[in-house]
């Protein structure tokens, strides 16, 4: 099957975003205003404010170069919040991104939480469905930090995305990078996107190597920096995740997948099965593009690149049946 020509990601026109962030409204050290100033200073245009169990829309922070997404992070561990959840119990953390904060404000302000019935997947999925209905995109966060395995997450439904990388968890020593979990979710038949996030709390200064800001981000190809445009791009998967490297265009032309990046050591196209398309730089050198002829039998594929510092970036999974 020859795949049609199409642009999967443009060469430019991205807005840099941190979609997981804590402030003084929950357990972060910085105010929303301080977060905005710091992130703008590092080239970010978008921050989703995901304070624990505190839905907020920081519209007052918006300006022509900055957009605040209304959001919150909710937890479900089967116990009331407190020492019961800590430190060795499994827990679900979900980020909820509001697609239209002008709608249903009263009920959203209640920051609804899932029923505390760990192991009752039906009730959790009912919650996710209800939140989708309310207008939230739901992201499954940091599986490894949550001490969760395949059995805990394979039956989740209604997810917009999961965190393939969480910089804060990386600093916690809990493997912030979850490519295996993402592949497992895809192989279980789910179609969902992948986010890299900071999950920053900023308990140490930006100059401290353990500071958890500016390590995981997504680059969103929105038409303009406006709430609806950004949500449209997120829903359509027009974004990529990164710890540092930049993707500079992904397309299919004449049945060939073409990838351009900032200088990296490795460009892979991971697939549903065991096959993987690979391009590696000679040792000590870098590459900036790769071309992979497609068979149309890949099932799904996703690009992953790694630079000389060991930092990764990658696309969402593209399902051949949708191309
Ligand atoms: Zn969390
Ligand atoms: Zn968090």
Image: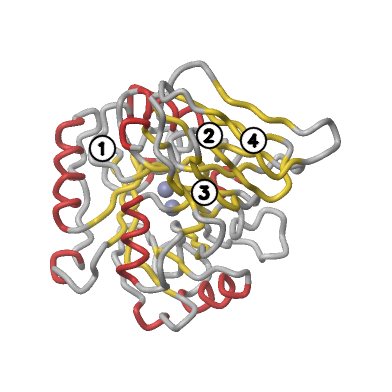
Whether pointer 4 and pointer 2 mark residues with C-beta atoms closer than 8 Å, the reply is no
Q: Which residue is mark 2?
A: 256
| Front-most of residues 228 and 26 | 228
Q: Secondary structure at mark 2?
A: strand
Q: How many neighbours does mark 1 have within 10 angstroms: few (below 14), some (14-19), or many (20 or more)?
A: some
Q: Which residue is mark 1?
A: 78
Whether pointer 1 and pointer 4 mark residues with C-beta atoms closer than 8 Å, the reply is no
Q: Quadrant of the C terminus?
A: top left
Q: Which residue is mark 3?
A: 241
Whether pointer 2 and pointer 3 mark residues with C-beta atoms closer than 8 Å, the reply is no
Q: Residue at x 49, y 60 (%)?
A: 18
Q: Residue at x 27, y 40 (%)?
A: 79
| Front-most of residues 195 and 169 | 195
- The first of marks 1 and 2 along the sequence is 1
300 relative to 18 in the view: left or right: left
In the image, residue 306 above or below residue 234: above
Q: Secondary structure at mark 1?
A: loop
Estimate the x, y position of residue 175 in percent, counting from the top left. Answer: 57, 36
- The first of marks 2 and 3 along the sequence is 3
């Amino acid at each position: 099957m020859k795949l049609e020509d199409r642009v999967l990601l443009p060469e430019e026109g991205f807005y840099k975003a941190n979609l997981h962030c804590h402030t003084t409204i929950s357990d972060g050290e910085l105010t929303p205003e301080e977060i905005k100033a710091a992130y703008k200073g590092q080239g970010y245009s978008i921050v989703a404010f995901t304070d624990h169990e505190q839905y907020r829309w920081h519209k007052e922070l918006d300006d022509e170069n900055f957009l605040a997404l209304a959001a919150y992070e909710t937890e479900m561990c089967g116990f009331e919040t407190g020492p019961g959840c800590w430190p060795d119990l499994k827990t679900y953390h979900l980020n909820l991104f509001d697609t239209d904060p002008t709608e249903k404000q009263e009920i959203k302000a209640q920051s609804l939480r899932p029923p505390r019935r760990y192991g009752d997947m039906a009730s959790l999925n009912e919650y996710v469905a209800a939140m989708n209905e309310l207008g939230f995109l739901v992201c499954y966060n940091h599986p490894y930090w949550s001490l969760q395995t395949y059995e805990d997450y394979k039956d989740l439904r209604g997810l917009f995305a999961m965190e393939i990388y969480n910089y804060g968890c990386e600093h916690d020593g809990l493997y912030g990078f979850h490519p295996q979990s993402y592949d497992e979710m895809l192989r279980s038949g789910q179609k969902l996107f992948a986010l890299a996030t900071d999950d920053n709390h900023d308990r140490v200064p930006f100059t401290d190597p353990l500071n958890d800001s500016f390590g995981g981000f997504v680059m969103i190809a929105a038409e303009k920096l406006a709430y609806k445009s950004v949500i449209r791009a997120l829903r359509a998967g027009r974004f990529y995740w990164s710890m540092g490297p930049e993707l500079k265009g992904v397309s299919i032309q004449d049945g060939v997948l073409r990838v351009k990046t900032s200088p990296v050591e490795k460009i892979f196209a991971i697939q549903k099965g065991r096959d993987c398309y690979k391009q590696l730089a000679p040792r000590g050198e870098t590459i900036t593009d790769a071309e992979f002829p497609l068979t149309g039998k890949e099932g799904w594929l996703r690009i992953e690149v790694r630079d000389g510092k060991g930092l990764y970036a990658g696309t969402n999974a593209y399902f051949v049946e949708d191309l």
